[in-house]
Image: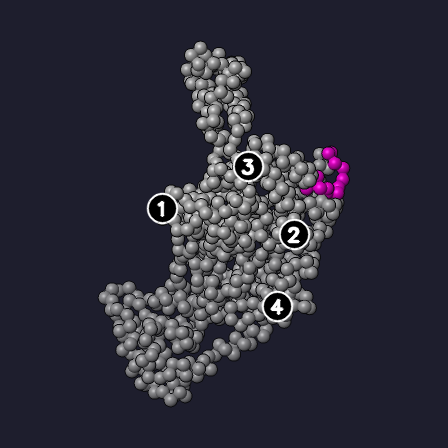
Amino acid sequence: MPTHADVNHWLDESGLDLIEKARERAVKFNQRYFRGPQILLVALESGLLDNALLRTGADPEEAVNWCAPTAEKSTTRYSGTTEPILEAASASDLVAKGRELERLLNEHDIVESMLSTGLGFVSNELRTAPFSVDEVFVEFAKTNPAIAESAADSKTSTSRPAPAGKAGKTFEDVLARYADNLSESVKTKDIDLTKTRMDRIRHIAGILGRLVRPNPMIIGDPGVGKTAVVEGLAAWSSTDEAPEWLKGCQIYSVSCSSLIAGASYRGQLEERLQQIIDAAIVRKDVILFLDEVHILGDPGSTGSSNLLGLFNPYLSRSAFRLIAATTTKDFEGKIRPNDAFVRRFEVVKIDEPTREETLEMLRMHLPRFEKHFGYSIEDEALNAVINNCERYLPSLRFPAKAISILDSAFQSVRDDRETGKKTDGPVTTETVLKVISRESGIPISRLSEMEHARLKGLQEYLESRVYDQKRATNAMTSAIQRLRLGLSDPARTKVSFIFVGPPGTGKTELAKAVAEYLMGSLRALVRFNMSEFQTPESYQRLVGPPPGYVGYDEGGELTNRLMENPYSVVLFDEIEKGAGRVFDVLLQVLSDGHLTDNHGRIVDCKNSVFVMTSNALADVEDCDDAGIREMLLQYRDPHNPHQQGPTFRREFVDRLEIIPFSRLSNDTLKRIAHREIDRVINQVATSEIITCSISVEDATMDWIISQIDSRTTGARSVQRLVEGTISRVISDSYIKGSIKSGGNYKLCVGDDGSLKIK
């Protein structure tokens, strides 16, 4: 907050004299502070306003008689000996006035501020004046000697020197220190405006030409090209097609991170911001571009802790033009709560470009890469950048991820050339796959495998994971092949199933197998247990709670995961336990192929596989599709006596492909037992703690399998059986010291009929 001493740096001789006489009047009144009434009283008594008062028909003497008692009682009495000082609010307003005019203030400027803005007066004090404040202001402003001088100076110079107390630093110095001239730097980039988003550029240019709020706020996800759009605007401003209000303008980019760097205290940062604002006000040809503007915001704060508030008084009167940029998430969390700041802007949303647009952008950048590295790239490799980035780097955005992979691919060829592995370019598809494998963590063998070969082997892989469910694996394989070959409806979610049947038959395992086969790991599986979504408000976990609720800034669990990875397998376990509002959310996914989260962002769901499992129908293996649908429509949750109507609505069931699972036969359960036993033995062999070899005799295997009978239901029961026999015996033997690391042992059946290790 500016002080009395700070004000003196912005006053000329007449202004200093007026403030000094007002201070003396405060001494006479025994006041600790002085403000507008004392200053106006001195101006009236000196006759400074006489001509203006007389021209409006007012009586100067009557004005003095009105102002004197107001000044005497305007502040509290003070019995101390400290000299009176100018009230802090009045001091701040005068400093702001000096910065706005960019010159020293004279006595006319001070009085004008009081008459035009009520500087130094409280709410109703000026309303009781015996003259028209507005009319007196108009007449008085005509006599200000600084107006003619200011007009003359503006004709001879486009920029003014800094006022006294600024160490002679010019505005060009300030801009050079804290900002980069984009208008100059883009001249070396050879930007092809036909391959940029001219619709967004023209929109931003139109906002900059407005009389009110000429300030665009650019928002978008990281990497979608917000800065590139501003660079395109800077390049376009120097062309003949640019509008008149944009021609000749210089766009200066201010990095908020660089601005904060080295500022040891808040006042230093405020001073830097103020210097930049002052420079933009004086240099009318300057447009500021404030990147990462959220760094200056303090969510929910409107006080001194919010640096964005420094811009408000200047933006409110359009003193300069400002382009701000931030991410969608940071805009919602850190910028939107600052309503006074947001009101000064027009929001411009930058969406992620399409594959075709990104390919054009890559072609625009190619000459720079080829010139820098000295070799070219094959057309097939360029297409591989787009295709594989979209599939294997879904958490990043076009065009940034494609440009990054392209750059890394060129560098990879240069690295191979330096190490003697390769003598020359060009960049090939193999190079691109190697780079994407490194960035995504997916083995290159899986990336380079032909798509049709992978789809051909899907059926066999699923059957190796889920036994004795031929009908289910066939249906899933067919659906995945349609998805990969683009034969599904492009306007809807392409693959959506409901797995019905008794528990322990492989419903969840099949969803896991699809995720692992398509994406190489379970990272692509998004799983929700519907027993956690039984309350009416629990659906908010999927798309995010509304504004004002805890977790609003974090978004929804489902929408966040799909934004990070649009190629996912989404599993809703035991869907019949979900509340009705959960079905409303899923209905939007199945119908439209997208979701809208609590921030209004549209999340694409068309490339994800949606699987719902249900134990509601136990015996469906002999039923056809129509019969199973009818059974689902009639199902009511027996554990929910308050349920009104069936659990599943027709519009929901009709959008799903139903896959029935049959009960597992004893032979299948024995196959599962063999697999689980092998798994436990392999775990022991590779364990970092035990690390020993254990073999299982045939008689022992037969004994374990004999424990499985018709009363055992499902694969989970088999898993529990193996865990409760083999795993328990191994762990007990190791604790007792019967087995040691590095040894060879046999698992056999003892004379007492129990398992033992020898």
CA separation, marks 2 and 3? 32 Å
Q: Nearer the viewer, residue 646 or 705?
A: 646
Q: Quadrant of residue 313?
A: bottom left
Task: Check residue 236 in the rendering and tell me which mark sits there, or answer none.
Answer: none
CA separation, marks 3 and 1? 32 Å
Number of residues whose C-alpha sits closer than 10 Å to that of mark 1, classed few (under 14), some (14–19) or many (20 or more):
few
CA separation, marks 4 and 3? 60 Å
Which residue is farthest right?
423
CA separation, marks 2 and 1? 51 Å
The residue that mark 3 highlights is: 510
Q: Amino acid at mark 4?
A: Leu
Residue ID at (51%, 39%): 620
CA separation, marks 2 and 4? 31 Å
Number of residues whose C-alpha sits closer than 10 Å to that of mark 2, classed few (under 14), some (14–19) or many (20 or more):
some
Residue 529, position as x, y percentages in the image:
45, 41
Task: Check residue 246 in the rendering and tell me which mark sits there, or answer none.
Answer: 4
Task: Check residue 355 in the rendering and tell me which mark sits there, or answer none.
Answer: 2
Instruction: Judge from the rendering whether residue 2 lies leftward or rightward of residue 414; answer left or right.
Output: left
Residue 389, position as x, y percentages in the image:
63, 45
Above or below for 643 versus 440: below
- Which residues lie in the magenta part? 420-432
Q: Earlier in the sequence, mark 1 or mark 4?
A: 4
Residue 699, position as x, y percentages in the image:
52, 15
Q: Earlier in the sequence, mark 3 or mark 1?
A: 3
Residue ID at (41%, 76%): 116
Q: Quadrant of residue 439?
A: top right
Q: Amino acid at mark 3?
A: Leu
The residue that mark 1 highlights is: 641
Asked if the magenta segment contains residue 423, the reply would be yes
Regarding residue 242, the answer to whether it shows in the image is: yes
Residue ID at (46%, 44%): 575
